[in-house]
Image (cartoon, helix red, strand yellow):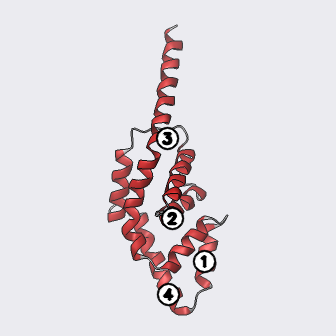
Amino acid sequence: MKPLLFSLLAAAMLIASCQNADKQAPQIAGDFCNCFSKLEKSMSADSKNMIITASNSAAPEKSLEQGILALDEENQIRVSQEMIALNDLANENSELGICMKKVEKKYENSLTRDKKKFMEKVVAEMEAKGTCSLTAAFMRIGLKTGNFDK
């Protein structure tokens, strides 16, 4: 009887934590958007549009490459430099990396069984805000490239 009770209790805790995470999706989306706001303000409209277009593509990297090649030479150089600057996304010690770690730590107790499905909810919240399209695009690309698997 005790193993059954323990299993039921564990299942109830998992369900409760998933519901808690779902309720926090809007706050998590907002916090991630705040992390990216400085980066978003510093990027050209061409770069932002390319990233957003790529995030809706089945092959984001190929879409970005084609987008850059479609620009004139001067804009290719500028956009390429901005894309290189996006390496800060992977640098945990950059301002953006530190901010993202803080957000992850803040919500680390909001466990969910399916991280990918939860991140899709966070992206939907970002898109609903209307002011967070670039961050949503980065997250969408992450989902497509497998960065948010279970």
> How many angstroms separate mark 1 from mark 2 (CA)?
20 Å
Neighbor class of circle 2 (other Cα within 10 Å; few <14, some 14-19, many 20+) is: many
In the rendered image, which residue does mark 1 sit on?
65
- Give the residue type that dot 3 points to: Asp
> Of 53 and 80, which appears nearest the observer?
53
Residue wearing tag 2: 133
Q: Are marks 4 and 3 in contact (CB under 8 Å)?
A: no
Q: What amino acid is labelled 1 in the image?
A: Glu
Q: For the residue labelled by badge 4, is the local secondary structure a helix, a strand or a loop?
A: helix
Question: What percent of the width, then of the height, locates residue 142?
Answer: 54, 58
x, y percentage for residue 50?
A: 56, 75
Q: Name the amino acid type tagged 4.
A: Ile
**Residue for point 59% across, 65% down:** 55
Q: CA distance from mark 4 to mark 1?
A: 13 Å
Query: Would you name the residue on which mark 4 appears?
Result: 77
Q: Which residue is mark 3?
A: 22
Q: CA distance from mark 4 to mark 3?
A: 41 Å
Residue at 44% in and 71% down: 86
Q: Nearer the viewer, mark 4 or mark 3?
A: 3
* Circles 4, 1 touching at the beta carbon (< 8 Å): no
Nearer the observer, 51 or 30: 30
Residue in view at x 55 percent, y 71 percent: 51
Which of the marked residues, 1 or 3, is nearer the chain's N terminus? 3
- Image coords of residue 109 (percent x, y): 39, 38
